[in-house]
Image: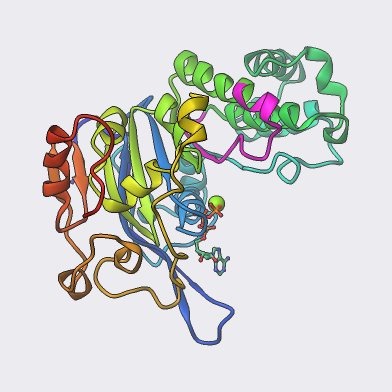
């Protein structure tokens, strides 16, 4: 069902890979549903290998999902083929983590941007020149950079160019796959601020993939938490961070470093323990149960259905409602496992 106001709706998406282990499948994205409203900035967090990039890549068509639907502006993309599909898909652009791998080293920055403009039919040289000027300006780069090659640029500048290239085709959704994590700490905040600025000025919706929960908390209005291919919790970001109600989210939040050095000095090690199970052989029932401090036999039986804990706040855990209620009685800090 399309809810009023959704720009992008991913429904029950499943993307599997044949793994290197012979004959085994990895279900990297397992029955995932997410939605984005126009202009909304939404976070997607989870540990390495949980399927965040595969979900993003499936949305833009870089991976081929086995089942599920991707609905953009009410149109199911799987119902389209060829040119119609390419044109629709252009509204969704991907910003990669690695600004060194995502630009063509043989093209100047101007040529790279001109190529993107040609795709949307802006072929006139003078129009291209003006548009390139605007694009570079939008991402905080000087006009003179158009003559340069990617190898002459810093990581932060390259990522700005990659963002300009995405913007050139006038997207409505950006999938930002850890776009600042490969950058030096000193430029991360600047590029992050650029995203917030673009989002504010241009109204482009963003699915912001990150490990860094502090970053997502600051930037997004809603957050999805992913574990081993599944969304385990989602809520308005303020609600999620105030009342995390899936034991996995609680564990992840325990790993947010504090800006306060006194807290940081006495910080407990993250309460999450053990490694992510092999995705070729995930646990039955709740996938987090093998690492969950609160797991009981019931968790092995079947995957817990999503429970709505507050308007727009869902968690897939049999005791999520109990954990959510506990937040009211424990005003300081997270409720700890018994
Ligand atoms: N092309 C592929 N072939 C086989 N397996 C793959 C492929 N791409 C991803 N996988 C597997 O799918 C799972 C999800 O990987 P994915 O890259 O989506 O995770 P991620 O959450 O983006 O991780 P990270 O935070 O490290 O970027 C992993 O088990 C990974 O090994
Ligand atoms: Mg990834």
The residue closer to the viewer here, 232 or 270, is 270
Instruction: Give the left or right position of residue 134, taking residue 110 as reference.
Output: left
Residue 80 drawn above or below residue 163: below
Q: x and y percent of residue 241 in the render?
A: 31, 34
Residue numbers of the magenta segment:
171-189
| Position in image of residue 104 (x %, y %) | 79, 42
Tell me the quadrant of the picture where the C terminus can be found. bottom left
Number of marks? 0
> Which residue does the image show at 16% across and 59% down from the upper left?
305
Report the residue at 28% width, 75% height from top: 284
Residue drawn at x 50%, y 87% as measured from the top left: 23
x%, y% of residue 69?
32, 55
Quadrant location of residue 328? top left
The reply to whether the magenta stretch includes residue 172 is yes
Quadrant in which residue 218 is drawn? top left
Relative depth, front residue between 291 and 215: 291
Residue 142 x/y as whole percent: 77, 13
Q: Is residue 68 above or below residue 298?
A: above
């Amino acid at each position: 069902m399309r809810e009023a106001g959704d720009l992008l709706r991913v429904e029950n998406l499943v993307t599997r890979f044949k793994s290197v282990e012979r004959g085994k499948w990895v279900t990297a994205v397992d029955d995932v549903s997410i939605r984005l409203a126009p202009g909304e900035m939404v976070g997607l967090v989870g540990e390495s290998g949980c399927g965040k990039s595969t979900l993003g890549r499936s949305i833009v068509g870089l991976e081929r999902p086995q089942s599920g639907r991707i609905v953009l502006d009410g149109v199911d993309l799987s119902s389209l083929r060829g040119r119609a599909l390419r044109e629709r898909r252009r509204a969704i652009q991907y910003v990669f983590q690695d600004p060194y791998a995502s630009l063509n080293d043989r093209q100047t920055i101007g040529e790279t941007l001109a190529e993107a403009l040609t795709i949307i039919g802006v072929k006139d040289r003078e129009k291209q020149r003006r548009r390139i000027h605007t694009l570079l300006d939008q991402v905080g780069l000087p006009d003179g950079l158009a003559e340069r090659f990617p190898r002459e640029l810093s990581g932060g500048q390259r990522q700005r160019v990659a963002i300009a290239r995405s913007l050139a085709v006038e997207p409505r959704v950006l999938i930002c796959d850890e776009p600042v994590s490969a950058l030096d700490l000193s430029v991360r905040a600047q590029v992050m601020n650029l995203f917030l600025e673009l989002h504010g000025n241009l109204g482009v919706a963003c699915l912001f993939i990150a490990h860094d929960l502090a970053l997502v908390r600051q930037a997004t209005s809603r957050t999805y938490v992913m574990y081993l291919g599944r969304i385990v919790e989602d809520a308005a970001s303020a609600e999620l961070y105030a009342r995390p109600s899936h034991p996995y989210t609680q564990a992840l939040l325990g790993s947010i470093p504090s800006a306060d050095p006194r807290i940081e000095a006495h910080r407990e090690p993250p309460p999450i323990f053990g490694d992510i199970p092999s995705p070729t052989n995930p646990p039955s029932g709740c996938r987090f149960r093998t690492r969950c401090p609160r797991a009981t036999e019931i968790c092995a039986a079947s995957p817990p259905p999503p429970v709505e804990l507050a308007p727009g706040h869902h968690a897939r855990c049999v005791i999520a409602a109990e954990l959510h209620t506990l937040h009211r009685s424990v005003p300081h800090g997270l409720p700890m496992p018994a």
